[in-house]
Image (tube, grey):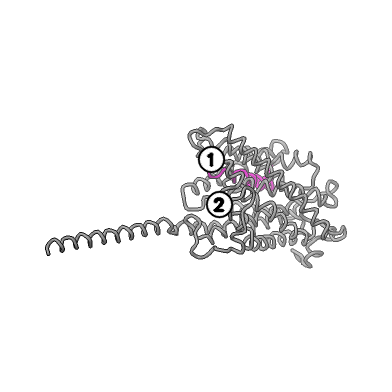
Amino acid sequence: MKLRSKLLSILLAAAAAGFAGTSCAQDAAAAAVQVDHGDVAWMLTSTMLVILMVIPGLALFYGGLARSKNMLSVLMQVFVIFSLITVLWALYGYSLAFGGEGTFIGSLDKIFLNGVTIDTLSGSLPEYVFVAFQSTFAAITCALIIGAFAERIKFSSVLLFSVLWFTFSYLPMAHMVWSAGGLLFEDGALDFAGGTVVHINAGVAGLVGAYLVGKRIGFGREALTPHSLTLTMVGASLLWVGWFGFNAGSALGATSGAALAFINTILATGAATLSWIAGEALFKSKPSMLGAASGAVAGLVAVTPAAGFVGPMGSIVLGLIAGLVCLWGVSGLKRMLRVDDAFDVFGVHGVGGIVGAILTGVLAAPAFGGTGAADFSIASQVWIQAKSVLLTIVWSGVVSFVSYKIVDVLIGLRVPEDEEREGLDITAHGETAYQN
């Protein structure tokens, strides 16, 4: 009886240990996929900051640069593009950008957000948070383009072009750069928050559009001056504030990487502002408010691909270079190209994105305070960065050209001359920004 009792005790102990082991394994598995509430709070905040960048930030920045008779048309285009693209993102954009592991594009596995529920996760985040955050990137990229052909394009044409370009340029680029299996992702291209995907992509699309839509009436013969640099300054300030969500939010959590991107967003922007106005003072005799605002945006653009990879001193160097190069981009280069890029989309976003993407390959090196590995090769990484820049230019250029041509055939690109002279606020929307 004693032996049987002892054997029963051993079996019960073993069973208890087994149950305890199973329970511990289950607890460990649950802990591994537990939502980090700090990350969630930061990413929801970052998402709202990026929305602030677009509406009202970008809208006011561009609106102030327009003439008063076109102010509302610019606000309307930015506002409605944001609304349109966020809906398309949920319908099919998220799936094609981040679903599957194709080389050039994702899959339709998550079309209409199929399989995305309140319980599904993306890292330490509810997947809905990641979907929302990335939707704002897609929306601002499409909205950036309109600054190149502002004041002379049909509203319906802007919307149709945005649908085509979002589908065939933005989504493939986002997948290739940021999604596992994507061509540039697998190649090792560094793009922390969108130097290629957002800025070069949009800058090239704007340049192509400026050529195909044509120059504004009076361009080169009369002053087409901004109607409110005050609003442009307010818009630039909102862009700077919102860009903390754009860059630091791209760490996808409340981490030390977010802190690095945050301080770099301050320093690069400040440095670019200073170098731009210094260049103006040297070559144009007077520093301008428009120059300061433009320099700030140039710094924000240039640091976007580098924000989580370079050190603070590297971000200052990057900003100083970007300010001067983008100043040349909106003056010397623009004259060489003979294009009416109304609000300098290519000169700031295209050129700034190229500068940032290439220099990320240099300044990410540990020798310059970057976060690269000990065996980081500047030459190899710069070559990878250059390939990503070239692919983005070609991809966006071809898709943009075809998309504009499709729109032109179907509904036409440009408003009639009499409507352009009267202003798009009245002719397209039946409203005016200001009462006489």
Could you tell me residue 55's position as x and y percent? 64, 60
Q: Nearer the viewer, residue 110 or 354?
A: 110
Instruction: Give the dominant element type of the magenta stretch: helix, strand or loop.
Output: helix
Which residue is disc 2 drawn over?
Answer: 244
Could you tell me residue 209's position as x and y percent? 77, 50
Residue 262 falls within the magenta-colored stretch: no
Which residue shows up at 61% across the image and 62% down it?
Answer: 111
Amino acid bearing label 1: Val
Q: How many marks?
A: 2
Amino acid bearing label 2: Phe
Q: Is residue 293 above or below residue 36?
A: above
Query: Which quarter of the rendering shows the N terminus?
Result: bottom left
Question: Of circles 1 and 2, which is in front?
Answer: 1
Mark 2 nearby-residue class (10 Å; few <14, some 14–19, many ≥20)? many
The magenta-colored residue range is 287-311
Which residue is disc 1 drawn over?
Answer: 310
